[in-house]
Amino acid sequence: MAAWDKLRIAHIISALGRGGMEFAVARLAVEQKKMGHDVCVICIRDKGPTEQFLNAGGVPVHLCAFKSRLHPVSVWKLRRLLRKLNVDVVQTHNYRPNVSGVVAAKLAGVPAVISSLRTVNRWDNARQFWMDRLLCLWRDAVVCVSDEVRKQYLAKIKWRPQIFHVIYNGIDSAFLAPRPTSEHLLAQYNINRDGHIIITVARLVPIKDHATLLRAFRKILDVQPNVRLLILGDGPLKDELMELAKSLGVHERAHFVGHQDNTIEWLRLSNMFILSTHVEGFSSAILEAMASGLPVIATKVGGNIESVQDGVTGFLTPPQDADAIAEKAILLMRNPQLASSFGIAGSRVVASKFTIQSNAQNTIALYRKILEKRRLS
C-alpha cells in the first residue's frame, strides 16, 4: 500500500447537536470512512443526536469532556486518547476545538493538524483572539468553508495566509436523485396545499433572522394569499417567533414543524427556498434546496454569494430587508418558468461543485499534501 493510502483521522468537535455545522462534519467523516480511511469523531463537551448518523456510517464517537476550554488535565486526557488512537491527522471544528484540540494534537505528536472555520470567529475578548492567532503557528492548515470566510478571517488575523484553504461544504448526492413527493407529510401537520409552498431550514436562533422572513411573508400574503411557509428547525426563539407570527396575522399559514430528519422530502414538497440569515459561513441548507430543484432567495452575506448565482440559480437580497425578500418571492411565483430555470440551474451547480464526494476528496488531498511535505522536511 502506497504511503498515506489509508489514513487514521480524528475529527474533534464540541458536541453533536442538530446544527448544520455538526451534520457537515458528520457527513465528511462518514464519506472519508467510505473512501477506506479509519475515521473517528471526538466530542469535548458532550455527544448528541448526530451520533446516530455517525454510528450508522461506521464512524466511532469518543467523549473526552473538558472542564474548561484549556483545562490542563482535560488537554492531557485528549492527548492521551490521540496517542492511543495513533492518528495521522486531526481536524478540529470551531473555536473551542480549534484551540484545545490543536494543543492536545501537538502534544500528542500528531503529524498533521488542521483547523476548520465555518464562520468568522467572534472572539469574546482579546485573550481569545491572541490565543487563536498564536495557534496558527501549530496549525498545518486552516480549512475555510467559503472564500468570504477566509477573507474576513485573514483581515482580522493578518498572519500566515499560506495555510488558509477553501474547501466548500458538500451534500449527499441523494438530494439530486428524482424522488416522488411525500404529500402525506402535510397531512400529518394539518397543512392544506392550496397554493405555493415556501420553505426555510435553519435553527431558530438570532443570526438566522426568521423575524425578517416572517415580516416578508406578511407582505407576500398581502399580494398572494394562497401561500404557505414551512419553517424547519428548532431553537430557543421558537416561542418568540410563533408569537411574532401571530401578531403579524400569518400564524395560520406559517407552520413551525420543528427539526426534521427527512429534510429532502420536505424540500420536494415545496416551490421555493428562502434563507434570511444575516451571518453565514456556507449554508448546506441552500445546497440541499438547490439540489432538490428549488429556486433560492438568500441574503447577500458570507458564503451565500458563492453558492447562489444571483439571477441564475436564485436571488440575493440585502440582509434584514423584508421588502426585498417579498418582492423576489412574488416575482418567482408570478413567473413559473423563471423559477423552474433557477431550480434546474441550481441542481446542476450542486452536482458539479458541491457534493460530499468532492468535499471529502479535496480534504483528503490536503491531508496528504501536508503529510508528504512533513515527510520530506
Image (cartoon, rainbow, N blue to C red):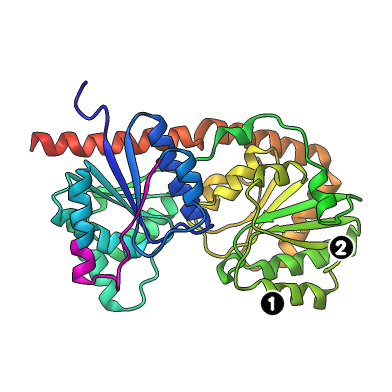
Which type of secondary structure does the marked residue at label 1 adopt? helix
Q: CA distance from mark 1 to mark 2?
A: 21 Å
Compare residues 37 and 92 and report the one nearer the observer.
37
Q: Please, what is the three-letter code of the amino acid marked with disc 2?
A: Leu
Image position, residue 216 (x, y; %): 76, 65
Within the image, what quadrant is residue 343 found in? Answer: top right
Q: Is there any visible trace of residue 217 in the rendered image?
A: yes
Quarter of the figure with the C terminus: top left
Tell me where the magenta segment starts and ends, as one range: 59-76
The vertical placement of 45 against 273, above or below, is below
Which residue is labeled 2 in the image?
Answer: 221
Q: Is there any visible trace of residue 136 in the rendered image?
A: no
Which type of secondary structure does the marked residue at label 2 adopt? helix
Within the image, what quadrant is residue 218 found in? Answer: bottom right
Q: Which residue is drawn at the image coordinates 71% and 65% (left, top)?
A: 213
Query: Was residue 71 drawn as part of the magenta stretch in this picture?
Result: yes
Compare residues 136 and 305 and report the one nearer the observer.
136
Q: For the image shown, how many numbered marks are present on the structure? A: 2
